[in-house]
Image (tube, rainbow, N blue to C red):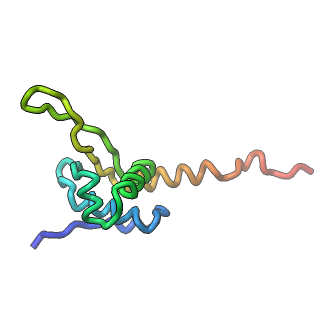
Amino acid sequence: MGHYFLLPNEIFTLGLSPSEPSVYAYLLFCEDRKTHQCWPSIGRISQHTGMSTSTVAKYIWRLEEKRLIDVEPTKVQTRDGKVRNGTLRFTIWPIQEAIDYKLERELATLPDPKHSKKRR
């Protein structure tokens, strides 16, 4: 019991490519429900979605661009004190963020009604 996660219905209204929901779903699967964050490597996402690492990276960028996720690099300190790049930290935004952003972009492309009136 309890071994499931929900995929918001609105995900299908955002104009995502067929593979973007797969990457998004995997991030939701990994997400800490309290912090809304997760740290899977691109290799791990690739392994579980069946996509190449470059394809996963492309879709991560697109999901971030569409305001579904935020991606931050992390740093780790080794035992000998050296600082190295860590895994990416993914934050899953509320779905309403992506919906609002999509609507804002669509509204921005509409013609301005003040300038589209015909003159007599």
| Front in this rendered view, residue 64 or 8 | 64
Q: Position of residue 41 (x, y in %)?
A: 24, 51
| Front in this rendered view, residue 74 or 52 | 52
Q: Position of residue 114 (x, y in %)?
A: 75, 46
What residue is drawn where x is 40% and y is 65%? 19
Quadrant including the N terminus: bottom left
Q: Is residue 56 left or right of residue 107?
A: left
What residue is drawn where x is 28% and y is 47%? 91
What residue is drawn where x is 23% and y is 44%? 87
What residue is drawn where x is 36% and y is 57%? 56
> Hey, which quadrant is residue 84 in on the image?
top left
Vertical placement of residue 5 versus 70, above or below = below
| Residue furthest to the left | 79
| Residue furthest to the bottom | 1
| Residue furthest to the right | 120
| Front in this rendered view, residue 28 or 41 | 41
Total count of labels: 0
Q: Position of residue 115 (x, y in %)?
A: 77, 46
| Front in this rendered view, residue 5 or 49 | 49
| Residue furthest to the top | 81
> Hey, which quadrant is residue 10 in on the image?
bottom left
